[in-house]
Image: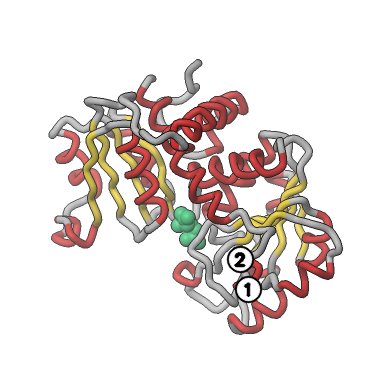
Amino acid sequence: MKLSTPHLLGIKDLLPQDIRLILDTAKQFKEVLQRPIKKVPSLRDVTIVNLFFENSTRTRISFELAERRLSADVLNFTTSASSVSKGETMLDTVNNILSMKVDMVVLRHSASGAPHFLAKHISSAIVNAGDGTNEHPTQALLDAYSIEEATGSLQGKKIAIVGDIMHSRVALSNIHLLTKMGAEVTVAGPPTLIPKFLTEAFGVNVTYNLKEALQWCDVANVLRIQLERQNQPLFSSLREYNIAYGISRKLLDSLQKDIIIMHPGPINRGVELDSDVANGHESIILQQVENGVAVRMAVLYLLAGQ
Ligand code: NCD
């Protein structure tokens, strides 16, 4: 079985069978990761560069670990320590690296569309590790994997995506993935953080009432307020946001049903999630991080085989 695409630029371009193939392959890699010897030779002699033009903790470490578990040769690049700060363009930077015979590029960039631009100019396989406010496909894949692991399937599941929908690449990738795989999606948050066209364009429900969304859903995927992407105030204060849209223990208990709580990290404790919810029995946040390595191994393995 092969993917229908040579790159992973976004979930938008994937077919449902591509998503299924990645999730099934990830399951095999997760089994490998439970063994005493966690390393497989699948990507021996494949060289991968992690190009991070934007800050990251989880995603960068997760990709690097996935690459090393597959026995790839790994190069790391971060903007602050590179010639980008001397004025070099992204394309020049990448072409210079590729001329040293690099096979795959994992790219994070603050500009939406940066990996799509690169894909037009270079022949190596590209994995989008987050582009601006556009997509973060491996995050949506690991979220989907974690939902399946916790609930059995995606088909027919009710997923609420809560918070800063407008600036979140995690939200867009999740919406594409969940709707392609037969889940129902409701987005919830303040009107200023939810784009107006979502229902018509993507077939998702919109509500500005957090409790209504939580009452409806099986799983709530809670997003960080992306203050670094908001160049004007879109709500009055973080404290007020927490009162209207933060998830507290009291709110969860008032639902009188069990829901699963997810978050892509980094969490702003006390803003979108209270600490006792983030650490509570409903939370699968650390399972998401664990599954991220297996999912990224699957993506890299399948793309290398193209
Ligand atoms: C997200 C990101 O950078 O897009 N984090 C992540 O990759 N796990 C979400 C965020 O920054 O809020």
Contact? badges 1 and 2 (CB < 8 Å): yes
Q: Residue at x 17, y 56 (%)?
A: 82
Q: Position of residue 169 (x, y in %)?
A: 52, 53
Q: Position of residue 37 (x, y in %)?
A: 36, 33
- Tell me what residue is drawn at x 61 percent, y 65 percent: 278
Foreground: 228 or 245?
245
Q: Quadrant of the C terminus?
A: top left
The correct choice, above or below, for 10 with respect to 220 in the image is: above
Distance from mark 2 CB to nearest ligand 1 atom below 8 Å: no
Residue 269 in view: yes
- Image vertical order of residue 121 relative to residue 267, above or below: above
Q: Which mark, residue 181?
A: none
Q: Nearer the viewer, residue 173 or 267?
A: 267
- Residue 274 is marked as 1
249 relative position to 141: left or right: right
Disc 1 from disc 2: Cα separation: 6 Å
Amino acid at the residue labelled 1: Asp
Residue 209 visible to the viewer: no
Residue identified by numbered label 2: 278
Q: Secondary structure at mark 2?
A: helix
Viewer-closest of 112 and 24: 24
Name of the residue lying farthest toward the right: 256
Identify the element where label 1 is drawn: loop
